[in-house]
Image (cartoon, rainbow, N blue to C red):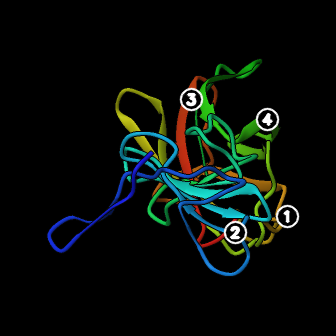
Amino acid sequence: MAITISGSTGIAGVDGSAGTPAIQGTDTNTGISFPAGDVIAFNEGGSEAARFDASSNLLVGTTSTPTSMTNAVVNKSTARAWIKLTDNGTTVTTNASFNISSVTRTATGNYVLNFTAAMSVSDYCVVGAGGCNSTSMRAVSLPFNSTSPTTSTCPIQLVSADGALGAATQYLSAAIFSASY
């Protein structure tokens, strides 16, 4: 394959690979390669360490957009975990979620969310809403005077403006944001 050096297009004609990057220093298996259209990969020690995919996501430890937190897309504006659940007083049902392995109801209106992949810190932000019927909106909050959030679990409660906990037949949506994993 010919390498072209041009004043208008720069260096072109070589994509490289993880083991032999197109752009490298004195360490010949560490550098930058171009493994696919609109993809830039960063290689270290002959292995791909990170890449920008064709959607401009920074992927670390993976070559495709993940469906779990094991290898995460790095974006500080993305929720690290989220859940939509319903509770009929007997059964808690997870309707949809991301990075939540299970939910435990500890009392009426109180739940503990268990993360699939732990957070690196426990000082994350929880936002959400829910209700007990179509006319009763309630806020999701971290409980006061209760279990503190940890890197693997997040206690939440569904409360009304007057502080009353949620009743049966409730729905709840919550998202957890953190600056780091």
Whole-angstrom CA distance, mark 3 to mark 1, is 22 Å
**Residue to which mark 3 is pinned:** 170
Sooner in the amino-acid sequence: mark 1 or mark 4 = 4
Q: Nearer the viewer, mark 4 or mark 2?
A: 2
Q: Position of residue 141 (x, y in %)?
A: 59, 59
Sooner in the amino-acid sequence: mark 4 or mark 2 = 2
Tell me which residue sits at (79%, 35%) in the image: 101
Whole-angstrom CA distance, mark 2 to mark 1, is 46 Å
Q: Secondary structure at mark 4?
A: strand
Whole-angstrom CA distance, mark 1 to mark 4, is 19 Å
In the rendered image, the residue lying farthest to the left is 8
Residue 30 numbered mark, or none: 2
Q: Nearer the viewer, mark 2 or mark 1?
A: 2
The amino acid pointed to by label 2 is Thr
Looking at the image, do the residues carrying marks 4 and 3 touch, with CB atoms under 8 Å apart? no
9 relative to 27 in the view: left or right = left
Q: Secondary structure at mark 1?
A: loop
Crowd tier of the residue under label 4, counting other residues whose Cα lies within 10 Å: few below 14, some 14–19, many 20 or above: few
Sooner in the amino-acid sequence: mark 2 or mark 1 = 2
**Residue to which mark 1 is pinned:** 147
